[in-house]
Image (tube, rainbow, N blue to C red):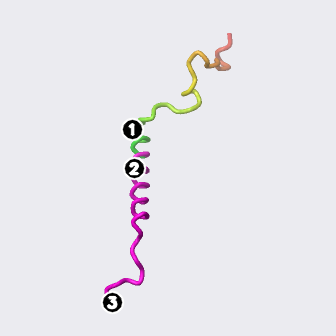
Amino acid sequence: MADQSPYPGMPRWVKISGVVAAMLVLLAAIVIAFDIGGPHGPGRHMSPASETPSANDRP
């Protein structure tokens, strides 16, 4: 009984959750570093024909 620690080790689900979270953070860092996602913003979902001209484009 002297070999047993009074505190048990981390549960398996905690270790797996930590590994999954670390992998997601690494994946997000790779996507940001290599600009894989492309341009972002509200204009990404609009067609070019629906864009409104800016204030400087007035005749």
Tell me, yes or no, whether the highlighted magenta stretch contains residue 27: yes
Nearest to viewer (mark 1 / mark 2):
2
Q: Which residue is the site of mark 1? A: 34
Q: Is residue 35 left or right of residue 47?
A: left
Q: Viewer-proximal residue, 47 or 35?
A: 47
* Quarter of the figure with residue 5: bottom left
Q: Residue at x 41, y 35 (%)?
A: 36
Find out whether residue 9 is within the magenta segment.
Answer: yes
Gap in angstroms between the C-alphas marked 3 and 1: 53 Å
Q: Quote the CA–CA distance across marks 2 and 3.
A: 41 Å
N-terminal of the pair, mark 1 or mark 2, is 2
Q: Position of residue 29 (x, y in %)?
A: 42, 46
Q: Residue at x 43, y 45 (%)?
A: 28
* Among the two numbered marks 3 and 1 on one chain, the one whose residue lies closer to the N terminus: 3
Residue 52 locus on image (x, y percent): 64, 19
The residue type indicated by label 1 comes to: Phe
**Residue designated by label 3:** 2
Query: Magenta residues?
Result: 1-28
Residue carrying label 2: 26
Q: Amino acid at mark 3?
A: Ala
- Per the picture, the main secondary structure of the magenta-coloured stretch is helix
- The percent coordinates of residue 31 (x first, y second) are 42, 41
Q: Is residue 45 above or below residue 58?
A: below
Towards the viewer: 41 or 13 = 13
Mark 1 falls on what kind of element?
loop
Work out whether mark 2 precedes mark 3 in sequence or the reverse, and give the earlier one: 3
Answer few, some or many: residues within 10 Å of disc 3's Cα (few below 14, many 20 plus, some between 14 and 19).
Answer: few
Q: Is residue 33 left or right of residue 39?
A: left
Residue beneath the point at 39% across and 43% down: 30
Q: Secondary structure at mark 2?
A: helix
Mark 2 is surrounded, within 10 Å at the Cα level, by few (under 14), some (14 to 19) or many (20 or more) other residues, namely few
